[in-house]
Image: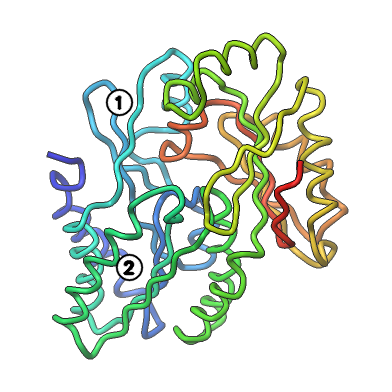
Amino acid sequence: MSCFDKIDLYLFAYISHTYLGDVNMDYVFMTDASCDLTEKQVSEIGVEVLPMEFQMEGKCYLHYTDARMMSLDEFYDKIKKGVDSKTSQINYNSFTNYFETYLKAGKDILYTGISTGLSGTYNTCLMAVKDLKEKYPDRKIITIDSLCDSAGLGFLVYLAGKKYADGASIEELAGYIKETRLKICHWFVVDDLDQLKRGGRISAVTATFGKALQSKPLISVDDGGHLVNVGKIRGKSNIIPTLVKHFERDGENSKNNIVFVAHADNKEGALELKKAIKGKCREVQICDIGPVIGTHVGSGMLAVLFLGKRNLKS
């Protein structure tokens, strides 16, 4: 039995009590916990974040933006000790029950979540929505493939959430997301090659040579929302200059825009990257990579997310 199946009833009661009375819009803007937004960012824009499941040591947990079931410090401590972690997509029944809570209350729904290029979660959502539309023909349920991953999804949701909080209609917000999603530039540097090896992302030979040569994978996201290994960075001292270089190369109207810096158990690196970018943009916000993505990238990952042109050249 999945973690969702065991505690769904609690979750639905929690959602109904916590959120329905506070939603002033005639629709609810929703995403999933792979977005890696902080609790503060979520509260600021009023988006509803559906928890996602991970399993460690024979136990299952749901990851929320406030990490109430397992702190990020505890999660990464286990990862660094070699504890295996596995993730699961949101299942059909959970999507149905989450959405139906709002549909019964007369709310429409706009949902964008983890890219189809990284997970089957969105396709499961579509199956649930198909049935819900037949059951609630008078309600609007709009789903959009974000074509973004991890904090890139969070960045897209945060920007869209600003529009949502300002009163954009469901059609206006859907249009903004579709218009903006391919303008979200993702640049990640992964530090934990062993974790990539355990997750099947790289071979044991590649991990061994990478560690010996002190090289780190430089990863971006293509227009289909797939993670793409663009190149390698030799030496830790070159990580931040490389990320800044890509921001300066691909960013558009950066002086007037916000930038996200994301990290997986690498606060020192995130603060250093923020310092290097600050002054080149309007604002820099830091977010933490949670267990859903952290399971695959391990401790130490560093990323920069910004508006610009997706460019897969290293």
Quarter of the image where the N terminus is located:
top left
CA gap between label 2 and label 1 equals 30 Å
For label 1, the SS is strand
Q: Residues within 10 Å of mark 1 (few under 14, many from 20)?
A: some
Residue 212's disc is none
Between residues 31 and 283, which one lies in front from this camera angle? Answer: 31
Q: Do the residues labelled 2 and 1 touch (CB within 8 Å)?
A: no
Q: Which residue is drawn at 18% across and 63% down?
A: 97
Q: Is residue 194 above or below residue 190?
A: above
Between residues 15 and 79, which one lies in front from this camera angle? Answer: 79
Q: Residue at label 1?
A: 56
Between residues 300 and 18, which one lies in front from this camera angle? Answer: 300
**Looking at the picture, how far across and down is residue 35, in whole percent?**
48, 52
Sequence order check: which comes first, mark 2 or mark 1? 2
Q: Residue at label 2?
A: 19
Q: Is residue 4 above or below residue 266?
A: below
The amino acid pointed to by label 2 is Tyr
Q: Is residue 82 above or below residue 284?
A: above
